[in-house]
C-alpha cells in the first residue's frame, strides 16, 4: 500500500487514495510505459457491430453533435468520411482477456466499484464535447494523442436539446496532450473535454457511483420478495362515516402498524448489495459449453490447471456469502476462502486441496457458462 507505483506517478496507493481519490484530478505521465493499446480501430469497430455490445457513435458537424446507439453495421462507419466522429464501446473487458488483465492494475479499488473498460476511437478532431460524469474514471491513452481540457467549474448548465450532456459554457482551467501510456484520473463532477490530435484511442476505466435514490429503489424491490407480514386487514368494530369516500384514521393506523413490522439489518443490506452489484447488465448473456465435460473430466482438468471466470462474470463476497451474477449462497469457512480467492483473482490455480467439495460447487457454474477450466 505504501510502495510508490509507476501507475500512480510515483505515489503510493495510500497517498493516492488520501490526496486524490474523489477529490482532485491527477495527470500521470507514462503510467503504463509500454502501453500502446489492446486492439486497433478496425477491431474496435468490428466489436461495435456485434450483437451483444453496447456502443455509441458521436458525430459532429458545424459545432452540432449527433448520437447513434448500437447495433451498428460496418457500412455505418464507411460513410463517415473525414467528418469529426467518435465511436465508444462499453464493456470491452467482457470480450478481451487482455482487457481484464489491464483492469487488474486497478485492483486497489474494490471490485464493488468497478463498472467496466470503455474504449473509444476518433480521427483527428473527434470528441464528444465538454461534459462531466458522475463516476470516477482513469483515462489511459493508447494509440495517438488526445488533448484533455478540464475544469472544476460549478456551472452544470447543459446545451438545451442536445443529444448528449454537453456543457453550454465550458471554461478551460488546465489542458494537456496525452500520448501512449499517459493517464489522467478524474473524480466525479470534474468537467472535461477530449479532442483527438490525430487518430487516437482512449481506454476509460470507469468506477460506478450509484445514486442513493437508485440504491433505495432497488433495495425495496429486493425486500418485496423477502418480506412476510402475517394477518389480514380487519375492522370488526367498523363505525359509520359521515363521508363514505374518506379514508378513516382507524384504517390508516392499522395499516401503519402492519407496515412498521417490515425490518432489515446490515446483513440484509450486505446481501442486497452483493446481489445488486454482481447482477449483470440486461444485455449480458452467458453461453453454456456446447459440449460440456463430464463431472469427472471437469474435476480432473480443474485439479490440474485450475479454473478461470468468464469475462462477463461478476463475483463478489462478504462474510461467508458468495455472490455470483446476482445470486447468493453461504458457504463453510474453508470453502468460502477458496471461492473468495477466485473472486479476488478471477482465477483459481490450485484446487487440489478440498478438491471434491470445491469442484461440486464449481461444476454447476461451469455448466451455466460462468467459468471454465484453465488451459
Image (cartoon, helix red, strand yellow):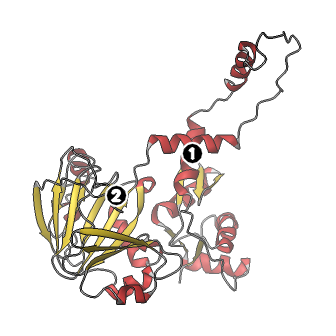
Q: Nearer the viewer, residue 55 or 299?
A: 55
* Residue 245 location, quadrant: top right
Secondary structure of the residue carrying tag 1 is helix
Which residue sits furthest right?
236
Number of other residues with Cα within 10 Å of mark 1, as a class: few under 14, some 14 to 19, many 20 or more: some
Q: Nearer the viewer, residue 126 or 244?
A: 244
Q: Nearer the viewer, mark 1 or mark 2?
A: 2
* Whether residue 23 is visible: yes
Residue positioned 59% across, 54% down in the render? 322
* N-term mark: 1 or 2: 2
* Relative to 109, 334 lies left or right: right
Residue positioned 59% across, 48% down in the render? 320
Residue positioned 34% across, 58% down in the render? 161
Q: Which residue is mark 2?
A: 161
- Vertical arrangement, residue 256 with respect to residue 88, above or below: above
* Relative to 237, 226 lies left or right: left
Q: How many angstroms separate mark 1 from mark 2 (CA)?
A: 30 Å
Q: Which residue is mark 1?
A: 218
Number of other residues with Cα within 10 Å of mark 2, as a class: few under 14, some 14 to 19, many 20 or more: few
Measuring from the top left, give residue 4's x and y in whole percent: 19, 58
Q: Do the residues under discs 1 and 2 have CB atoms within 8 angstroms?
A: no
Measuring from the top left, give residue 336's x and y in whole percent: 59, 55
- Vertical arrangement, residue 70 with respect to residue 291, above or below: above
Q: Which mark is residue 279?
A: none
Measuring from the top left, give residue 2's x and y in whole percent: 23, 52
Secondary structure of the residue carrying tag 2 is loop
- Vertical arrangement, residue 27 with respect to residue 372, above or below: above
Amino acid at each position: 500500500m505504501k510502495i510508490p507505483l509507476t501507475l500512480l506517478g510515483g505515489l503510493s496507493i495510500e497517498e493516492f487514495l488520501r490526496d486524490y481519490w474523489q477529490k482532485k484530478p491527477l495527470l500521470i505521465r507514462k503510467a503504463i510505459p509500454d502501453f500502446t493499446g489492446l486492439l486497433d480501430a478496425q477491431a474496435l469497430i468490428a466489436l461495435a457491430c456485434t450483437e451483444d455490445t453496447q456502443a455509441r457513435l458521436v458525430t459532429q458537424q458545424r459545432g452540432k453533435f449527433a448520437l447513434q446507439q448500437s447495433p451498428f453495421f460496418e457500412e455505418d462507419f464507411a460513410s463517415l468520411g473525414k467528418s469529426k466522429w467518435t465511436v465508444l464501446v462499453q464493456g470491452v473487458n467482457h470480450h478481451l482477456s487482455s482487457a481484464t488483465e489491464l483492469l487488474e492494475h486497478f485492483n486497489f479499488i474494490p471490485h464493488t466499484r468497478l463498472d467496466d473498460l470503455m474504449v473509444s476511437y476518433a480521427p483527428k478532431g473527434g470528441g464528444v464535447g465538454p461534459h462531466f460524469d458522475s463516476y470516477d474514471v482513469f483515462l489511459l491513452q493508447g494509440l495517438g494523442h488526445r488533448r484533455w481540457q478540464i475544469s472544476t467549474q460549478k456551472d452544470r448548465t447543459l446545451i438545451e436539446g442536445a443529444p448528449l450532456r454537453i456543457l453550454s459554457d465550458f471554461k478551460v482551467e488546465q489542458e494537456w496532450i496525452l500520448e501512449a501510456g499517459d493517464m489522467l484520473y478524474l473524480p466525479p463532477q470534474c468537467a472535461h473535454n477530449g479532442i483527438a490530435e490525430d487518430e487516437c484511442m482512449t481506454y476509460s476505466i470507469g468506477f460506478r457511483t450509484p445514486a442513493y435514490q437508485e440504491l433505495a429503489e432497488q433495495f425495496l424491490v429486493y425486500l418485496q420478495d423477502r418480506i412476510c407480514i402475517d394477518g389480514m386487514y380487519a375492522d370488526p368494530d367498523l363505525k359509520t362515516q359521515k363521508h363514505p369516500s374518506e379514508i378513516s384514521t382507524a384504517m390508516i393506523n392499522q395499516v401503519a402498524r402492519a407496515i412498521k413490522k417490515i425490518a432489515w439489518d446490515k446483513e440484509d443490506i450486505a446481501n442486497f448489495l452483493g446481489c445488486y452489484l454482481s447482477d449483470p447488465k440486461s444485455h449480458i448473456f452467458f453461453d453454456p459449453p456446447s459440449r460440456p465435460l463430464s463431472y469427472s473430466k471437469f474435476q480432473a482438468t480443474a485439479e490440474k490447471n485450475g479454473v478461470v471466470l468468464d469475462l462477463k462474470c461478476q463475483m463478489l463476497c462478504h462474510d461467508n456469502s458468495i455472490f455470483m451474477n446476482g445470486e447468493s449462497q453461504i458457504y463453510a469457512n474453508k470453502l468460502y476462502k477458496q471461492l473468495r480467492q477466485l473472486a479476488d483473482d478471477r482465477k483459481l490455480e490450485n484446487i487440489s486441496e478440498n478438491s471434491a467439495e470445491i469442484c461440486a460447487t464449481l461444476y454447476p457454474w461451469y455448466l451455466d457458462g460462468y467459468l471454465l477450466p484453465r488451459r
